[in-house]
Image: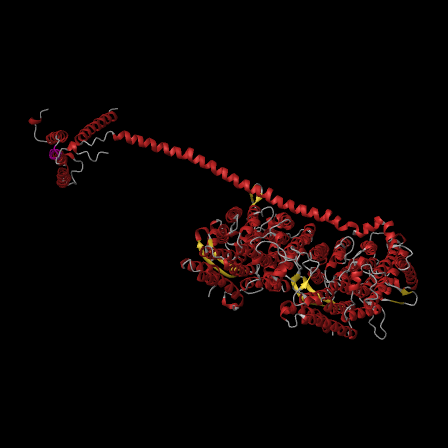
Amino acid sequence: MDTLLANLLTLAVLVPLAAAVVLALLGGKLPGHGRISAWVAIGSVATAFVITLVAAFVYQQASTESVVGTYYTLIELGERSLRLTYAVDTLTILLFGLVTFIATAVMVYSTEYLHEELAPGGVLDPDVRVPGHVPFIRPGRYNQFFATLSFFVASMLLLLIAGDLLTMFVGWELVGITSYLLISFYRERPLAGAAATQAVIVNRIGDTGFLIAMMALWSGVGTLSLFSDASGSTSLLSWAASSEASTTLLTVASIGLVLAAIGKSAQVPLYIWLPNAMAGPTPVSALLHSATMVAAGVYLLARTLPLIPAEILLGIAYLGAITHIWGGCLALAGTDFKRVLAFSTISQLGLMFIGIGLGSRDAALFHLVTHACFKSLLFLAAGAVIHGCSTGDLRRLGGLATKMPWTAGTMLVGVVGLIGLGIPGLQFGLSGYYSKEAILAQAAAFAEANPIHGLLYYLPLFGAGLTALYAFRLWYLVFWIRPRDEGTYAHAHPAPPRMRAVLVVLAAAAILAAMPIPGLELSVWQSIHATAGGEPRSAEWLVGLSLPTADAHHDAEHSMVAELSALVATVVGILLITAVYIWRQLDPSELAQRFETPVRFLRREGRVEAFYNTVFVAPTLGLASGLRWLDRHAIDPVIHSLAHMWIVLARWQDVFDRRVVDSAVQGLSDRLWSWGVGLHLWQTGRLRQYVLMMTAATTAIFLIATFVWNLTRSP
Amino acid sequence: MTPLVWLSLIIFAPLVAAVVVACLPADRPGPLRWITLAGLMAPLLLAKFLVVMPADSGVAFVLGEPDVQSLVQVDWIPTFDIEYLLGLDGLSYPLLVLTAALSVLAWIASWTITKGLKGYCLLFLVLATGMLGVFLSLDLILFYVFFEIVLFPMYFLIGLWGGERKEYAAIKFFLYTLFGSVLILVGILILYFTSDLTQLSDAQLVGAHLSDRTLAEITAAREAGEEVHTFNIMALRALGQSTEVFADDFLFGKSADWWAFVLLAFGFLIKVPTVPLHTWLPDAHVEAPTPVSMILAGVLLKLGGYGLIRIAIPICPDAAWELSGVLATLGVISILYGALAALAQSDFKRLVAYSSVSHMGFVVLGLASGVSAGSGEVTTETMELGLSGAMYQMVAHGVVSAGLFFIVGMLYQRTGHRQLSRYGGICNLLPRLSALSLVIIFAALGLPGLCGFIGELFVLLSAWAYMPIVAGLAAFSLVLTAGYFLSAVQRVFLGPVYTGPNAEHLTEITTRELIVLVPLVLAAICLGVYPEIVLAVMEPSAELLAEQIAAGISQAAAGG
Amino acid sequence: MNLLAEPVGLNHYLFVSTVLLTCGLICMAGKRNALGVLMGVELILTAANINLVAFSNPALRADSQLALHLDGHIAAIFIMVIAAGEAAVALAIGLNFYNNHATIDVDRADDLKG
């Protein structure tokens, strides 16, 4: 049964992967101008969804809580081994279902949204300026889009099924690179390429943290597995629960993990890539950059929660709170439909971080699921508007409720889900209501236990009001107030039926996702709650810090406080924004003038990107140029001067050769020559002279010899 | 078939082809090209067949056997104990196959070369012989000879078939590496003259694979109280690891193995190359023709890493251990320096060249943590991981860098320039070329599932146990790597239109180019998805080496 | 001493030899005719031969018990053979010289002067 479960979910990973490979290799050759490829991709992802459902039923029959196993071993090192493993528990199955469900919906939606890509003569891209002011026409990329999306689903599922940090890192990086490919889908637009590059680079800063965590844990613990297998082997979680766990190591590893999560989940200070990532097609923003991929950071922290010391959790909570508020503020001032939604995503992810940071993994994951439903709905509604009006500029939209009522209606569902409206006490509301309430209740319990950190309760509360403000502002600006650009309004057309159907399905999901399904044990909340490893560590050195139990938000007192206060904050927010745009009690332009400085500050998004460019990017590039200069003008000259030195030395040696050695040899030979010339005089060529000389010489030698002989003989 | 014939054929098949080529007329390119191809294919096939030969045939390369196999031992210059000693183990076999394969691919990439074709064929074949010989030889002098043989064809290939500043680049390459070679030679001689085989026990002598003649000499020398010197790498390894012959003071209060290691490492680090000894690399790469760049990056840089792991480290484990901090620092400096310098380049090929500096830094870092026994939290397993990581990174970088240089070469061949700022829109113009290029570039980025990731991961995991700060800095380099590669992708492949010169020559990838690039892409994917295919060969040897080093160091610690 | 008053001995031979040598030298140094020079050469060689024969006398030798005392004679015979050959060559040179220069005056034979 266990192997069946693992095999099923592995199959769910492999089917989209196979579809991606097939499409990448054969996509262009499929019949129907690539129309088929969309359905191949959708078929594969839907198959994965069905497999997940089957797996869910299998799981209910199975006895075990989780199934852990190894795909294969990378390397065996004595007792240690580096392995790619899987782990299946309820959370895995739940998130598999979530990802495949939303992916199927988004892909079906995309068949209409990207219909232009199928145009036989190529796609006219009005956003691209080319020299000569000719219209820019490029080949369609329908097939490529669906291939990449299938690959994304496979990578995301791999990330979710991972039973160890290494496998998770593999999925983590793969979703990152599919994100790159999809952000740069409109690769001719200069902003798209830059945004894609920026997304990867910023994410890689986080990945450095992931690597550091892996390195530290591998060195210190000797394994990267999160879960113990059936034989009870050491795993990170079992090690963290034991007394051997070293706080230093945990701190280093957790800082790394948090850095990774910050990068992926676009938290302050690494959030800047996410708004820019909106350069990709809207369905991509719906699937990757709001619902699934960006939530991977939260998922990572949720899985590794028992490793993270409480002090770091507190930091996570504050970071989340800052992000929650800052994202809300930016969303409130935004003028681009998709950017506003991106800031909203950042803000909501901040809320999930608060949940994690306060030790309530379950509430954070719960919000992750509900957020995925309503945020993908919001993005797809935005896509329908952009598709119908050819612009996402909020200053040119308005009054579209009459033109596209289905979109307006479903988006309203999304907005209400986002702000988490519900009726306290009755436990009735849209999905966001339940999850937000869970986080706020946890915050209330936390603030009660640690009054000094009361801010962690008030900030999300303020954030709830802020969410209501910007969410309704967005909806009013697009659908309700008088149209501000007649041309846009006149040309607006409603979403095609297929897109509309997807919106309705997702709206239903946004309403129902959090509700317990009667007759079925497997509600979202229970699935999350049944997953092991939700207990946070207690504080070691921060005296007095006490985390409430993970179940704190289920006690009635805190729930009621949270529900009521959230309702008040939300309603105040709604009333305020309605007063501005509907009742006209306050004039928006007058407001903008009165608060000119903060509005301008927020419109420029705090100039954070410029700040980063000045503080981080420019110095790095400067250092890079400096090193290039160093190579050319410092190291090379040393090499050159060394070479030059040898040449100079060689010259000197040459001089020595000529002046000293050569001239000595020359002088000797000159002398010999002149002697030869001198002797030459004796050679008269006269035979008789020679005879005389010989005679004389012989006589002389004889005489001398005799003389010497006598000399030596006579003592 | 004896190992002697088989291994000699692997090395000298290209040389035989070179003789044939030399006899052919120079004006008919067809036979020249095909015979050269045959001469380069032969080693690849022979090397591959080694694995599938039956185990009892004597020439088979048995997977999972850690020690040296297929040994060939013939006297060469007996007066100085120099032998024709060949053999294979898990460290050399992957690099041998890589070399043979890259030679073939680089040759197919050279198909368009017409200038001085005959000379080019000859030089290329001699180059192949040299490279293959380096990975097979187990005698220091034989190793050195092959190491030098590589140098000369390379000099002429860069200097005659290169770009604008080819003479400068060729001479710079030549002088740098020759300088390194001289140091290596001195190191080798130090080892030779301080070695003494009589110090080895009988069991160690068996392990050292000595010839009968040498054994007889040792017996005689033991009786006479003389020393027996050797160039045999395996014997020197045994000497360095289990005796004290190299430990005596040699010069300035440092031992012989310290000096030998410093000299050898210096020479090999020039080849790797390590900052600040790297400036020959960008120039040589930029000026060299594409196939030569592929060989240069794919194989020649590996000679440095291989020399360290085959000679310097096993023979002088104590010195390596003592200097591992320096080695690690040099490695991480190379990683960061190369990445930063690549970030500042405007020439695509220079960028790729600097990326090689950065990637090869991981090899040095891995080797450093592979010899760091006893420091920090290092265990033998950690060392094995570091050594495996370094080896894997070498293989992976061989595939990736050859691919990268080929990509740059294809673009250069079409447009006649390499300025990043003057490209753009290649994705739309040449979709197939771009798709294959992106796979290679992602592999270079260290994307999991492609070959660049495994080596870097192993090295990082191993390095943290040794020096956490260094490992952290190395991990940070991934950000920079992403930065320079993706900004290059953005400038070259993305964007609306190509605005540079020769736009009309931008044609889709040809069949011949596919034959070169597709195997590289497939290798990048296979090595990334299933690293076992290389690790199965490599890991037992890495494990053995790690154990030997660990034992060697503890021996020295006990003795000293 | 008076040579004429003594029995013939070594000194007589040496005396004759000296006379012949002196005659030969004078002949070589004095004659301009190449044939005359050649005659002088023959005289000198004869003087040498006489010396050799004279010194092979057993009375003059320390190893007289063992030797045959013919060494001097053998050497003389060799010299005579060589002298014959030498005379032939010299005459040929002379003839050739005459053919080329229409003279055999040795003073004019300085073509090979260095």
Residue B228's spot in the image, x, y percent?
49, 51
- In front here: A148 or B35? A148
Residue B301, x across and y down, in percent: 56, 53
Q: Quadrant of the N terminus of chain A?
A: bottom right
Q: Is residue A241 visible?
A: no
Q: Which residues are magenta?
A: C33-40
Q: Is A76 placed above or below B241 here?
A: below
Pinpoint residue B79: horizontal percent, then vertical percent.
Answer: 43, 51
Tell me the quarter of the picture where residue A531 sits.
bottom right
Q: Nearer the viewer, residue B232 or B397?
A: B397
Give residue A522's position: percent from left, percent from top.
Answer: 82, 71
Drawn side of residue A261 relative to residue B278, left or right: right
**Figure check: A110 above or below A694:** below
Foreground: B144 or B173? B173
Q: Is residue A290 left or right of residue B281?
A: right
Q: Quadrant of residue B496 in the image? A: bottom right
Name the colouring of the figure: secondary structure
Please state if B28 lies on the left or on the right of A638 as rendered: left
- As drawn, A460 above or below A633: below
- Magenta stretch, main secondary structure, is helix
| Quadrant occupied by the C terminus of chain A | top left
In this rendering, would A503 be left or right of B187? right
Residue A342 visible from this viewpoint? yes
Q: Nearer the viewer, residue B203 or B343?
A: B343
Picture quadrant where residue B439 is located: bottom right
